[in-house]
Image (tube, rainbow, N blue to C red):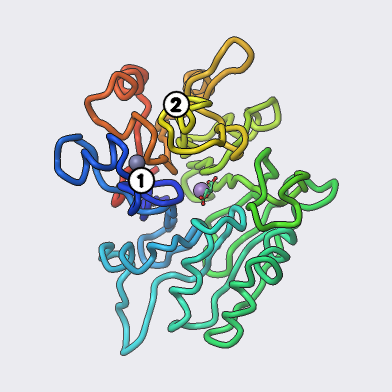
């Protein structure tokens, strides 16, 4: 299985257009050693020729321009992108669907909650009906059904499992105040040819026994790296929301709760990678103490253009 990181940043990317914090300002002028990052999305392939997008970032135009493996190959108009799987209905994960409107009808795999949000509160899919159109593939994660295994047409050797995870629906969703099964999913992807497994979850609010079970046996964890600390945005004066308010488990735990670093340390995965990194997170600075902690534990920080082969 090939994994191509198209965007490794959280909402807003890095540096964020209106942000003058130490990291964003320092990155712009080259004083903070950190890579710029677009908003999160990855592409998956079994053979390197056909690709599935996991989320569609608002930065999709730039991402596809920069990734030669995703350029058109045959005929006048073409794309190796065969489908899009959505983890949630957040702006940074779905707006890129609009950027695909010049192409063929889009095969979208998502839960009923996400299709609902994207045809009502944030009607991206309804808008697309006036352009390329969409084909819906409903993932059976809703009500009491907490996981659903599925295949994506044209990817016979990959087995996908959508797993309901703790998280937040977007601010515009009718479910924002009350978590509903299917608002947020993680994906377990297994390559049936070689047995390799990826666990992908760019937005994960907490890790309990159920999440640990799904992570168990993965060769690669590619998971929520939004915040280092629970109150990072408040401490930096950048916002009033905590990591928990936004549905993200911070890397650093406390007495009451293990952080994502602790979770990753307990995993036997060969590759442990953080993605969806917010511009406030000190791990973006390659010389930071927090980045050294990750290095010491063999935990990687995803960057745009990163390729992982399992
Ligand atoms: C999040 O991950 O919490 C959201 O994407 C935030 C945002 O889009 O501003
Ligand atoms: Mn996000
Ligand atoms: Zn900033």
Residue 273 percent across, percent down from the top left = 41, 35
Which class describes the residues within 10 Å of circle 1: few (<14), some (14-19), or many (20+)?
A: few
For the C terminus, the quadrant is top left
**Residue 105 position (above or below residue 152):** below
Q: Circle 1 sits on which residue?
A: 309
Task: State the residue at coordinates (53%, 62%).
Answer: 94
Check residue 235 in the rendering and tell me which mark sits there, or answer none.
2
182 vs 152, nearest the viewer: 182
Q: Quadrant of residue 70?
A: bottom left
**Residue at coordinates 45% horizontally, 35% vertically from top-left?**
225
Q: Earlier in the sequence, mark 1 or mark 2?
A: 2
Residue 73 x/y as whole percent: 30, 78
Q: Is residue 305 left or right of residue 33?
A: right
Left or right side of 68 for 59: right
Vertical order, 263 against 136 (above or below): above
Mark 2 neighbour density, 10 Å: few (under 14) some (14–19) many (20 or more):
few
Q: Nearer the viewer, residue 31 or 72?
A: 31
């Amino acid at each position: 299985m090939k994994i191509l990181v198209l965007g490794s940043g959280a909402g807003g990317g890095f540096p964020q257009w209106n942000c003058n914090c130490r990291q964003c300002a320092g990155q712009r002028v080259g004083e903070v050693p950190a890579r710029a990052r677009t908003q999160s999305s990855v592409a998956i392939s079994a053979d390197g020729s056909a690709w599935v997008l996991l989320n569609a970032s608002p930065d999709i135009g730039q991402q596809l321009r920069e990734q030669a493996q995703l350029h058109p190959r045959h005929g006048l108009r073409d794309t190796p992108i065969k489908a899009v799987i959505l983890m949630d209905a957040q702006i940074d994960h779905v707006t890129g669907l609009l950027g695909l409107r010049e192409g063929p009808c889009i095969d979208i795999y998502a839960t009923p909650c996400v299709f609902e949000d994207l045809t009502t509160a944030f009607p991206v899919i309804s808008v697309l009906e006036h352009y390329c159109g969409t084909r819906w593939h409903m993932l059976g994660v809703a009500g009491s059904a907490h996981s659903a295994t599925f295949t994506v047409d044209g990817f016979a050797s990959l087995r996908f499992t959508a797993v309901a995870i703790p998280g937040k629906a977007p601010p515009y969703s009718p479910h924002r105040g009350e978590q509903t099964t299917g608002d947020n999913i993680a994906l377990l992807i297994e390559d049936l040819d070689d047995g390799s497994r990826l666990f992908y979850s760019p937005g994960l609010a907490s890790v309990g026994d159920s999440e640990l079970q799904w992570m168990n046996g993965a060769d690669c964890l590619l998971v929520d790296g939004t915040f280092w600390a629970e109150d990072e945005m408040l401490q930096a004066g950048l916002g009033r929301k905590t990591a928990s308010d936004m549905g993200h488990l911070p890397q650093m735990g406390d007495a009451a709760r293990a952080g994502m670093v602790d979770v990753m340390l307990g995993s036997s995965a060969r590759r442990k990678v953080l993605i969806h990194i917010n511009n406030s997170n000190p791990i973006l600075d390659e010389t930071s103490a927090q980045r050294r902690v990750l290095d010491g534990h063999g935990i990687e920080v995803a960057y745009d253009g990163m390729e992982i082969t399992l």
